Image (cartoon, rainbow, N blue to C red):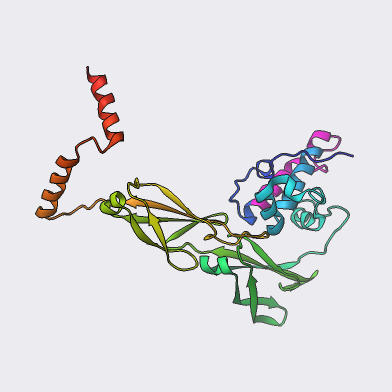
Amino acid sequence: MSTVRRVDYYELLGVGRGATQEDIKRAYRNLAMELHPDRNPDNPVAEEKFKEASAAFSVLHDPERRARYDRGGHAAIDGNADAMDFSSIADVLEGLFGEVFGRKRERPICDVNVDLAVSLEEAARGAEKELVVERSSAQGTTREKLTVRVPAGVQNGAVRTVRGGGEVGAGGPGDLHVYIRVQDHPLFTRDGADVLCTVPITFPQAVLGADLDVPTLDGPVTMKLPPGTASGKVFRLRGKGLPIFGGAGKGDELVTVQVEVPTEITRKQRQLIESLQEEMGDDSMPSRRGFLEKLRGLMR
């Protein structure tokens, strides 16, 4: 009995680690078109690659298993990593091959796909969102208001499925698929469970140090900026990110400080800066001093 090789699941499907559920589904369908045993009879290499792709899809299409895999790789899902979700795999492949794994479903099944926009704050703390769904049937179009639970730490592109919540077709009621779309934030960007924020600071703050008010998903906090902070330095606020989806704990907030250079200054400010430049020279700027020494060496 063969076992699936421990190859990176994202590499197997040819997608990035930030791929959406639709990206993963599309990549698996494309590989299945190429590798499925029905199209490659007596080809054990294609069969093995198809099994590997199916194992990858079985993990990555499930947000909870995907979150565990992202944190700990194959070791985090050992014990059932090779126990594929044949029902979901069959759902993807039915349109390609008709009957998959001995199961054939009468068509059409009228699934309904809807997008649900949530803010980054709602994705961080979890929320219940109301959604109006339109369904068509022989009796006409109906509108129903549903409440969808958005779990804390949910990823952009995650899917919440309501079984039997779609339209009614010849094969019975379809499912309702709710695609979570986490909206862009004016201050933060997201990297998994971490959030990133750039905070502008003044030149005096960078030189002298300061107590900075920094925004977080939990509200503003005061961060100690040490004297002599270079522009672009990154500070880590532990536990100020999003909850780790499907796991314990929270991510961090990474704060990048950016020294803002004024584009317009008064005559007095110019005089003060020129005096400061004369007073400081290059001795207080070791990187610049080293650069000038190397430059002089090249010009000799």
Left or right: 68 as drawn, with respect to 264 = right
Residue nearest the observer in this picture, 162 or 268: 268
Our reading of the magenta stretch's main secondary structure is helix
Q: Which residues are magenta?
A: 24-46
The count of marks equals 0
**Residue 18 location (% of width, % of height):** 58, 51
Looking at the image, residue 84 sits to the left or right of residue 140; the answer is right
Q: Quadrant of residue 118?
A: bottom right
Report if residue 30 lies within the magenta region.
Answer: yes
Image position, residue 146 (x, y; %): 65, 78
Q: Quadrant of residue 193?
A: bottom right
The verdict on residue 278 being magenta is no
Query: Residue reaching furthest top?
Result: 300
Which is nearer the eye, 153 or 290? 290
| Residue at 42 percent of width and 61 percent of height | 187
- Hey, which quadrant is residue 144 in on the image? bottom right
